[in-house]
């Protein structure tokens, strides 16, 4: 594949915050429950168990969170073939196409 072939495709990411909102909420609930269990264990004779509980829950849940984020991102990436000679217009709302604000005097 040479560089001229890539010009025949349009690379679009359709990911929005709403697509990952549920995943963030679930992970926040997981962290909250781990902190609640740590507080419950703080009253025990060995508070080290409380810190170990939080660390273990975060350590075990992080790979699942990253897997969910990455697969969601990959599911929202589109590579669409376009016809030769078709002019592509910028996608509305694309940050790279926006002009910076200018100060007026």
Image (cartoon, rainbow, N blue to C red):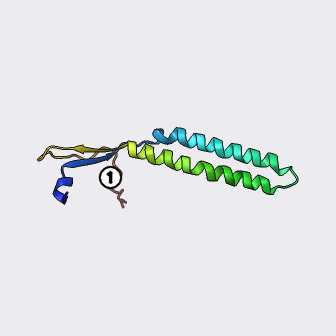
The answer to whether 44 appears left or right of 11 in the picture is right
Residue 80 at x, y percent in the picture = 25, 43
Residue 22 at x, y percent in the picture = 53, 38
The answer to whether 26 appears left or right of 99 in the picture is right
Question: Residue lying furthest right in this view?
Answer: 45
- The residue drawn where x is 81% and y is 48% is 41
- The residue drawn where x is 54% and y is 41% is 23
Q: Residues within 10 Å of mark 1 (few under 14, many from 20)?
A: few
The answer to whether 80 appears left or right of 103 in the picture is left
Residue 18 at x, y percent in the picture = 47, 38
Camera-side residue of 104 and 35? 35
- The residue drawn where x is 35% and y is 58% is 102
Q: How many marks?
A: 1
**Quadrant (top left/top right/bottom left/bottom right) for the N terminus:** bottom left
Camera-side residue of 93 and 21? 21
Camera-side residue of 49 and 25? 49
- The residue drawn where x is 21% and y is 44% is 81
Residue pointed to by mark 1:
98
> Which element carries disc 1, helix, strand or loop?
loop
Residue 105 at x, y percent in the picture = 36, 61
């Amino acid at each position: 594949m040479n560089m001229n072939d890539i010009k025949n495709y349009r690379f679009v990411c359709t990911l929005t915050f709403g697509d990952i909102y549920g995943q963030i909420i679930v992970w926040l609930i997981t962290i909250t429950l781990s902190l609640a269990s740590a507080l419950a264990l703080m009253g025990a004779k060995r508070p080290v168990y409380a810190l170990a509980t939080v660390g273990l829950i975060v350590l075990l849940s992080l790979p699942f969170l990253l897997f969910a984020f990455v697969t969601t991102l990959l599911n929202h990436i589109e590579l669409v073939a376009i016809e030769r000679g078709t002019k592509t217009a910028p996608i509305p709302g694309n940050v790279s196409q926006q002009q910076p604000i200018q100060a007026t005097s």
